Structure formats: C-alpha cells, structure tokens
Amino acid sequence: MGKRFRTLLNDVDVVFEQDPAARSRTEVIFTYSGVHAIWAHRLAHWLWNRKRYFLARSISQISRFFTGIEIHPGAVIGQRLFIDHGMGVVIGETCEIGDNVTIYQGVTLGGTGKEKGKRHPTVEDGVLIASGAKILGSFKIGKNARIGAGSVVLKEVPANSTVVGIPGRIVIQDGVKVENGLNHHLLPDPIADKLKELEEEIKLLKEERAQFMKSSTRE
C-alpha cells in the first residue's frame, strides 16, 4: 500500500515541477484532468492485468468522457508522467511509457494498422512530446528525446535527440544541449529552413538573369 500511495503522490508532485500555474496539492488533485486520467488508468491497468477486461475498459471510457484523455488500460505507464492540459491525448494498448515523461495536448501514441502484438511505441525515461505530435508504430523513443509540436514520427528516435517536422527528422543529437528546454514552439524547423534556402537560390538566379539580360542588351 505504501508503494501505491507513493506513486499517487509522485503523480501530484511532478505537476509542481512542470507547471508554474500549480498552486496547491488540493488544486492539483481536484482540478487537473491529466492527474485524473493517470489515476483512472492505474486502476484500470490493475484490473486489466487481472483479466477484468470489461471493467477495465469501462473505467477507461468513463475517464475519457470526463478528461478528454484516452489511455488504453493495457498500456504500461511508469512513475511521474506529466500530461499537461491533455485534451485529445491518445495512448494505445501496447504502449510503454517510462519515468519522468511529459506529454502535451493532442499527442497520439498509436499504431499503424491492424497488426497483432506490440504495435505501439515505447517511450523511454525523460522524453518530452510536444503538442499535437503523432508517434505511430512499434519502435523506441530514446531517453531524454524531444519531439517537436505537430511532428509525425514513424521510426525510432535515438536517445538525447530532438525531432521535428512531417515526417519527423532528427535535428539535434548526441550531447548537443537543447537551449529552448520546454519552449517547444522554438524548436528548429527543417522545412522552413529549406524553404529559406530555396528563396535565397531563387533570388540569386534572378540577379544573375538580370545581369545576363543587361549584358545582352549592351551587345
């Protein structure tokens, strides 16, 4: 019982570390939908492991109705998961989430089809998944990885990497510090960078054409 109670306290305490708007434990316990969804899942998962599938799914669906967060009771969730705001978060049946993971609203940890067995991602310790990101398939998101807002990730992400874009691309990896921390809206955008390069090339080509036309006129 002591271990279970410690787990519940950890679910509350992590909110104070991640959310500057949190003022008191009472406020977090009664008003934070992310905490409610996690607690409901812990009960549903306990029942799921004891083959009480209908009751487990019922609790999961009731939690979804009240919180807007859908966590399949078969999913494995570690300690100190922080779901910020949470509306629209979906976590699939065979998903595994480690400790100290942060998930923002609109995130999907899903599969890619109707295959059986392990079909959802494994999210290792310390990962941050920003708003609207979609991680689809059975592969690992390595420790301390950062998934940028709106990214679609379809393959494994190494530890200590930052991924952005559609499809997701690694833009920071192996020991390079992410200066923006939790300011995930400031993560680099490889698509925007490429468009900027193309604009510069077009500008250069226009200047060269203008020079060529000027030379031809003089001749």
Image: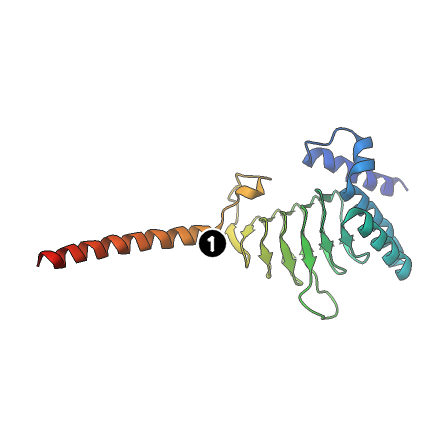
| x 88%, y 39%: residue | 2
Image spot of residue 46 (x, y percent): 87, 53
Residue 35 in sight here: yes
| x 34%, y 51%: residue | 200
State left or right for residue 11 relative to residue 193. right
Task: Compare residues 49 and 92 and report the one nearer the observer.
Answer: 92
Q: Mark 1 points at which residue?
A: 191
| Amino acid at the residue labelled 1 | Ile
Image spot of residue 69 (x, y percent): 76, 50
Q: State whether residue 14 is above or below residue 136.
A: above
Image spot of residue 142 (x, y percent): 62, 52
| x 36%, y 52%: residue | 199
Secondary structure type for disc 1: helix
Q: State whether residue 177 is above or below residue 219.
A: above
Image spot of residue 189 (x, y percent): 49, 49
Task: Compare residues 215 and 148 and report the one nearer the observer.
Answer: 215
Residue 157 in sight here: no
Residue occupying the far left of the picture: 219
Screen quadrant of the C terminus: bottom left
Q: Count every numbered label the image shows and give the total.
A: 1
Residue occupying the far front of the picture: 217
State left or right for residue 24 relative to residue 207. right
